[in-house]
Amino acid sequence: MESGEHMPDKIKFVSELARVAAPGATIIIVTWCHRDLSASEESLQPQEKELLNKICDAYFLPAWCSTADYVKLLESLSLQDIKAADWSQYVAPFWPAVIRSALTWKGLTSLLLRSGWKTIKGALAMPLMIQGYKKDLIKFAIITCRKPK
C-alpha cells in the first residue's frame, strides 16, 4: 500500500508483483501518481515537473508515473481484469488535517525538538502536496488486476 511511488524502476516493480502473485491472484496497487497525459501531450508541463521534483526531493522519492502508465505496464504483462480508480478526493483532505494537527503546541514542539531534519523537511513539503492535489496534478490511484490461472 502506497509503495509504488518509492520504486525507482516501475517496470521492475510491477513485473515483480506479477511474478510473485499466485495464478488467479488479485494484485492491488495503491500509489501516488501524477495526472494522466492527454493525447496531445508528450510530458507534464514544466511547472508541474518542478512541483513534483520538489515533492520527490522532500520525501526522497524517485520520479512518479501516471495511472495510465501503470495500466500499460500491467497490460504488457498480460494481466487480466485491469481496473483503475482515482481516490484523490478521499485522500486529499488528509494533508490539511495533518498540517492542522502539526500546528498545535504539542505538534510543533514534537516536530522541532524530537524529529530529525528529514521529518521536518517532509512536514514543510505538505503544502506542496496540497497544491498538487488542488492543481489536479497529484492522483491517489488504486489499480487492481488478476494474474491468469
Image (cartoon, grey):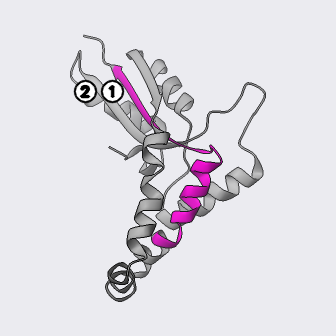
> For numbered disc 2, what is the local secondary structure?
loop
Q: For the C terminus, which image quadrant?
A: top left
Q: Which residue is mark 2?
A: 21
Q: Position of residue 46 (x, y in %)?
A: 76, 51
- Name the spot of residue 70 as percent of width and height, x first: 49, 31
Q: Position of residue 60 (x, y in %)?
A: 48, 63
SS type, badge 1: helix
The magenta-colored residue range is 123-145
Question: Tags 1 and 2 in contact by the CB under 8 Å rule?
Answer: yes
The residue that disc 1 covers is 18
Q: Residue at x 43, y 76 (%)?
A: 103
Is 20 within the magenta?
no
- Residue at 52% across / 54% down in the picture? 62
* Residue sitting at x 45%, y 67%: 99
Question: Is residue 141 highlighted in magenta?
Answer: yes
Crowding near pointer 2: few (<14 within 10 Å), some, many (20+)? some
Quarter of the image where one finds residue 25: top left
Q: In which quadrant of the rendered view does residue 52 lie?
A: bottom right
Q: Looking at the image, which residue is at 42% across and 61% down?
A: 97
- Please indicate, yes or no, whether residue 24 appears anywhere in the rendered image: yes
Towards the viewer: 115 or 64: 115
Q: Could you tell me the amino acid type at mark 2?
A: Ala
> How far apart, in angstroms, are the residues tagged by discs 1 and 2?
5 Å
Please tell me the numbered disc located at residue 72: none
Q: Relative to residue 138, is residue 114 drawn left or right?
A: left
Q: How many labels, in total?
A: 2
- Residue 20 versus residue 101: which sits nearer the camera? 101
Q: In the rendered view, tell whether residue 135 sits above or below residue 43.
A: below
